[in-house]
Amino acid sequence: MSSGQSAKCEEEGAGVGAQGLTFNEPLLFDQGSPGRRGCTLPECDVPELKPERLLPRKLLRHDIPGFPELSEVEVVRHFTRLSQWNYGVDTGFYPLGSCTMKYNPKINEEVWRLPGFSLAHPYQPESLIQGALELMYELEQFLAEVSGMDRVSLQPAAGAQGEVLGMMLIRAYLESKGSPRKRVLVPDSAHGTNPASSAICGYEVLQIKSGPNGRLDPQVVANAMDEDVAAIMVTNPNTLGLFEDQIAEIAKIVHAKGGQVYCDGANLNAIIGISRPGDTGIDVLHFNLHKTFAVPHGGGGPGAGPVGLKAHLAPFMPVPVIEKKGRRFVLNDDLPSSVGRVRAFYGNFAALVRAYAYIRSLGPSGLRRVAEVAVINANYIMSQLKDHYHLPYDTFCKHECVFSDARQLPHGVQTIDIAKRLMDYGFHPPTIYFPLIVKGAMMIEPTETESKETLDQFIDAMKRIAEEAERDPELVRSAPHKTKVSRLDEVKAARQPNLRWKGKTSGEESGS
Ligand SMILES: *Cc1c(COP(=O)(O)O)cnc(C)c1O
């Protein structure tokens, strides 16, 4: 880069924001030429079998409308270019709150790709998968130990599915005591999956208000608690990044009326190795291995949401459970009160191997260090930005801090504008407009894997945006300016995705 160029970047406050070699790329369907091929096969030297001899004629087609015909290099460039439009933890800082977008160490990938793991087939007999069973058995022990629970089911494929399983266990347990009860208490700061999971399990949801300090007040829980309440779902630390310091008291109140306590453990990264939910009266909780335990989020793809539970819920666990008989590991399907299977086979095994590798490579003291550094990083960002953005709950935080746009609103700049402008500076925006109890929320979770230099670049970008909002609000309102496309209709993209090929499309159309 010439000094002239670097001066220009400096002046624009480019930070790590990118410009330059990002290629335009039309749809595959708009490329290529009839007859172009990616590979050439030799002439067939055995008699050809006509498809008509294998399949009924009406199921055969002779033409695939709009099928793109391209050379190998065109295909490789197409997908490589598309991959370069993407943003992930391997390309930059990803401060998405409540998501723990930490860097995923490559050793975990290495380990799960060992042929004994990656090529194992779920129908292999127990005798040939002893290593895989041992790994899952040990992972259950590790997760039970860090959470203070008695047993763990590794089956659920995501946190949300873990919640559903947790509520199924609570329902089955209460039913065995005489009545499943009617209601579940969910705080107003909860993730949307909490009320959804309760509702799927047949419960009414009663929302309870957080106190003025952003935490649950035991008195409020006591007032809402009666013998119709099946459970309370508490996220700890909660989605404001605050530790629910009254959790033990709250658990006592709920237990006294025969209710159960569910902990949404999505934010475990802040307390791992320091505080164990099981020691504070929690009956059941889920882990998000794709958050706390460095398993990739995979673009919404395979994750894992194991569920930890206390002994009284163990008879209801999903089958099969993994047990140790002498020196052998066996799958036990014989659990008469089990809620059944919640996922095919054993859950997302590849995610389990990655989490196992992560735990083994860090060890107990390393896991504790994760939480310590995650908390320091979040408090550092909070302390550096609180003179520039409104901080509704001004107190030490755990793994994340939540600001609002209250100071920028008078200039006509809102949270969405700030988030979009951050992209010009090369950062993925934080979680926005969540939790719902903070109007115009910006929820920032740095995780432990970011260096001070990266945090400083981010802080610098946020400060510049706060300054721009006062000096040149239109610049922020019309952001992003440096991305391939500017503001998209996100609602339309989600509700009416246009994924079909409809003949030639113009490049302009897809870019608006
Ligand atoms: C991420 C998250 C969930 C849902 O977990 P998934 O693995 O995305 O299904 C639930 N609660 C909280 C607080 C979360 O952050």
Image (tube, rainbow, N blue to C red):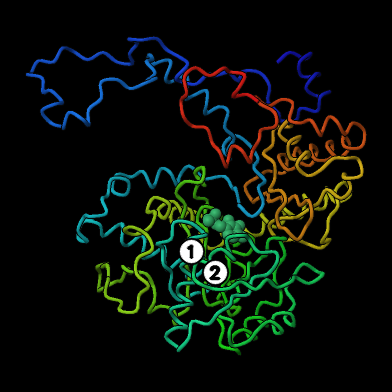
Mark 1 lies on a secondary structure that is: helix
Amino acid found under the numbered disc labelled 1? Gly
Tell me if residue 383 comes above or below residue 181 in the rendering. Answer: above
Tell me if residue 163 comes above or below residue 12 in the rendering. Answer: below
Disc 1 CB within 8 Å of nearest ligand 1 atom: yes
Tag nearer the camera, 2 or 1: 2
Q: From the top left corner, tell me how far across and down residue 80 is, in percent.
A: 49, 24
Residue at the extreme front: 58
Residue 369 can be seen, yes or no:
no
Mark 2 / mark 1, whichever is N-terminal: 1
Residue at position x 61%, y 52% from top?
99
Q: What is the spatial separation of the Cα atoms under label 2 and label 1, in whole angstroms? A: 12 Å
Residue 296 placement, left or right of 398 = left
Residue at position x 54%, y 68% from top?
199
Tell me if residue 457 comes above or below residue 38 in the rendering. Answer: below
Q: Nearer the viewer, residue 324 or 187?
A: 187
Q: Quadrant of residue 370?
A: bottom right
Q: Quadrant of residue 315?
A: bottom left
Kindly check if marks 2 and 1 are in contact, taking CB atoms under 8 A apart as contact.
no
Residue at position x 69%, y 41% from top?
429
Q: From the top left corner, tell me how far across and down residue 306 is, in percent.
A: 46, 63
Q: Nearer the viewer, residue 265 or 170?
A: 170
Badge count: 2
Amino acid found under the numbered disc labelled 2? Ser
Mark 2 lies on a secondary structure that is: helix
Q: From the top left corner, tell me how far across and down residue 493 is, in percent.
A: 59, 37
Q: Nearer the viewer, residue 340 or 367?
A: 340
Q: From the top left corner, tell me how far across and down residue 168 is, in percent.
A: 46, 72
Residue 421, numbered label: none
Q: Which residue is mark 2?
A: 198
Residue at position x 92%, y 44% from top?
410
Q: Which residue is mark 1?
A: 162
